[in-house]
Image (cartoon, rainbow, N blue to C red):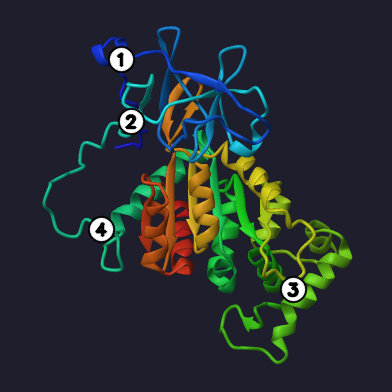
Amino acid sequence: MPFSLPTFKQIDFTRKDFADAPDVLTAPAPKDGVAPENYHSTSMFPEFFKFGGSWHLAKDSRMDCTVVRRQDGELEVVEPRRLKAGDEVVLGRSDDCDDGIFLDDDPFEAPEDEFEDKFAFRQGRSRETAYSRDYDKLYEILRYEKDHGNIVWVMGPAVAFDKDSRSSMQSLIENGYVDGLLAGNALATHDLEAGFFRTALGQDIYTQRSQPNGHYNHLDVLNKVRSAGSIAAFIDQAGISDGIMYGCTKGNIPYVLAGSIRDDGPLPEVSANVYESQDRMRAVLRKATTVICVATQLHTIASGNMTPCFRVVDGVIRPVFIYCVDISEFVVNKLKDRGSLSSTSIVTNVQDFIVNVAKGVLS
C-alpha cells in the first residue's frame, strides 16, 4: 500500500461548547520583550482562537511563545523576547474553549493498524524495543518527503566518527533526503577532519585506532579553515571530496552551526550568539515537515521545542514527523519530557542508524 499522510480530524465549530465560547481577550504588551499578565503560552499542537465569533488557527505555533493579533487579523506566534510595546497579545490560561482558546491535542487520524489498549506490555521505548517497523515507516516517510516535504536533520559529531555512517549521510544528502542540517561546531569540525586527515578526534575513521599526535588533527583543521576564511573555501583549497559538509556545500543545503561554550576554534560559520543561533535554526525548521535528531541532546531538545506537530501546506493541515535517535534512553525520553510528545524515539547506535537508513531508502 503506498504511503499516505495521516489526515487532520476536522473540528465541528458549530458544537455548543465552541458556539458558546467567548471571544478571546487580548492586552497590549507593556514594553518591548515583556508580555502582559495572563498571557497565553503556546504548545506544539494546533491551537484555535475565537475572534468575532469565528475560530482561527495560529499556523506557525511552537513551544513557549505568545500569540499576537496583527492589525489585519492575522495571528502571529512570537517569542516573548520579540514582543514590541503595544502588540495585541492573546490572554488566557484555559485551552478548552472557556477563554476562547481551543488546543487540539489529538489532531490526526490514527493509522488503521494502530492498536491501543489500556493495559499492554512494552509500550515504552527502550533498548529492548524492536524497531523494525519504525525503520520501515521512516523509509516510507522519507521517500514521500523527498518529493512532497522538507527533511531537516539535527546531528551530533558521532555521525562523523565512522567511515560508513559519514559516507551514508553524504549519500542521503546527494540523493535529496536532506533539506537542512542543524549541528554544532563539533560535527562540522570532525567531518572536515575526516575528509582531510581520515581521522575524527585523532582516531582513524575506519579502524578507530588513535594516530600519532592525532589530538592535533581537529585543531589543525580548525586553523586551516579559519585561514581559508570559510568551510567552502577550505573544501576547495584542500581538495576535500567527501563527507557531510562537502555534500551540504556542493548541494547548497542550508546548515546552521550553533556555538557552544566548549567549542574549539570555532569554524567561521559557527554562530557565537545563542539568540542568533536560535533565529537561524528556526528559519530552517519553519520549512520542516520531518525532523530527525541524531545523537545530540541539547540540539535535539532545542529543535523539538521549536517544531510544532503540524504544518499548514497549501491550506491543508498535515503532520510533522519528529524522530529522536540516541544510544541513551535518557536522551530520547528527555525530548518527550520537554513537551515534544509526538516524537518517535529510537534507541540505537547512531552510526548503525544512519547506515540502515541510507540502505533502506537508497536500495
Choose the circle earlier in sequence order: 2 or 3: 2
Q: Separation of disc 1 and disc 4 at Cα?
A: 35 Å
Q: Mark 1 or mark 4, which is nearer to you?
A: 1
Instruction: Give the class, few, some or many, for how many residues have Cα within 10 Å of label 2's Cα (few <14, many ≥20).
Output: many
Q: Are marks 3 and 4 in contact (CB under 8 Å)?
A: no
Q: Are marks 4 and 2 in contact (CB under 8 Å)?
A: no
Element at badge 3? helix
Please state the horizontal and vertical placement of residue 17, each as a whole percent of the image: 26, 16
Q: Which mark is residue 207?
A: none
Please state the horizontal and vertical placement of residue 302, each as a whole percent of the image: 53, 51
Provide the residue designation for mark 3: 196
Q: Mark 3 or mark 1, which is nearer to you?
A: 1
Choose the circle earlier in sequence order: 4 or 2: 2
Instruction: Give the class, few, some or many, for how many residues have Cα within 10 Å of label 1's Cα (few <14, many ≥20).
Output: many
Instruction: Give the class, few, some or many, for how many residues have Cα within 10 Å of label 3's Cα (few <14, many ≥20).
Output: some
Q: Amino acid at mark 1?
A: Phe
At x 26% / y 36%, what residue is drawn? 110
Q: Amino acid at mark 3?
A: Phe
Residue 8 position (above or below residue 194): above
Residue 1 position (above or below residue 195): above
In the rendered image, the residue lying farthest to the top is 52
At x 84% / y 70%, what residue is drawn? 224
Please state the horizontal and vertical placement of residue 59, each as a whole percent of the image: 50, 26
Q: Mark 3 or mark 4, which is nearer to you?
A: 4
Choose the circle earlier in sequence order: 1 or 2: 1
Residue 160 position (above or below residue 124): below
Provide the residue designation for mark 2: 107
Provide the residue designation for mark 4: 124
Q: Separation of disc 4 and disc 2 at Cα?
A: 22 Å
Q: Amino acid at mark 2?
A: Pro
Q: Separation of disc 3 and disc 4 at Cα?
A: 42 Å
